[in-house]
Image (spheres, rainbow, N blue to C red):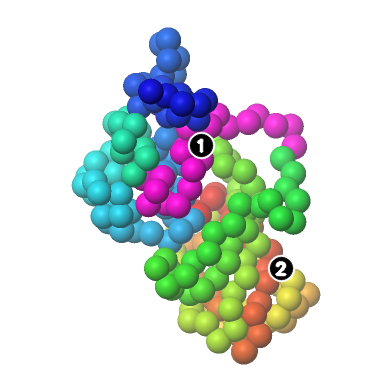
Amino acid sequence: MVKNRVEQRAAEAAAGGAGGARPIPIGPRVRHLRQLKGLRLKDLAVAAGCSESLLSRIENDLVTPSLSTIHRICKALAVNVSALVDPVEQRVCTTYGPDDRPRTSHGRAGEGDGSLCETLTPFGAERMLEGLLLELPGGGPLCGPFEHAGEEVGYVLEGELELFVEGERHQLPAGHSFFFSSSRPHSYRAHGPRSCRVLWINTPPTF
């Protein structure tokens, strides 16, 4: 029996919508959350107890997962079912307080870089940019290399950032900014023993 509204929305999503309504687009949210946690498609498939091909079809909205599969995916992602099935609010302006921004820790089970990511922009399939607050641990490994379409701009808030773009090394203390094309291979880490905090903007969204 469906016990609450979240369970009902999950059931409706699994059934392809209620009363002929358009199905809730779960796939893009699954991909978004998986990438936020630094998980490969294979990693999430194993954790959720489903095949990699099924998960790929779910992420691309080629198949609607069953209610039990939705629950397993949410458990593997360590999120509530509402993260996948709640409607996206069409707010004129989205605001977050310092304690209620979505946070993701990339520990040893994820990318392994020990970073903490706070998201400044709400989820949305049509979103054109992404704002992040990245906290990188002192003495941590390089994060990357990455190479993808788009552009990136950032501002170092605290500590010192070591940024590599297409083989060039840049050492950026607090107060310094950067900009580069995302198509150039890039990687980064905190420079020295202190942690580093960076305001980072990507377009299009990559996390």
Q: Is residue 166 above or below residue 102?
A: below
Are the two marked residues, 2 and 1, in contact with CB atoms closer than 8 angstroms? no
Query: Where's residue 175, x and y in %?
Result: 78, 75
- Image mark for residue 155: 2
Q: Secondary structure at mark 2?
A: strand
> Which element is circle 1 on?
helix
Say which residue appears at 34% left-offset and 21% top-offset: 15
Residue 139 to residue 5: above or below: below
Q: Quadrant of residue 190?
A: bottom right
Residue to which mark 1 is pinned: 82
* Residue range corresponding to the magenta coloring: 73-93
Coordinates of residue 160 in the picture (x, y in percent): 68, 81
Residue in front for this viewpoint, 136 or 176: 136
**How far across and down, in percent of the image, does residue 50 sit?**
24, 46
| Left or right, 169 with reference to 175 | left
Amino acid at the residue labelled 2:
Tyr
Residue sitting at x 42%, y 51% = 77
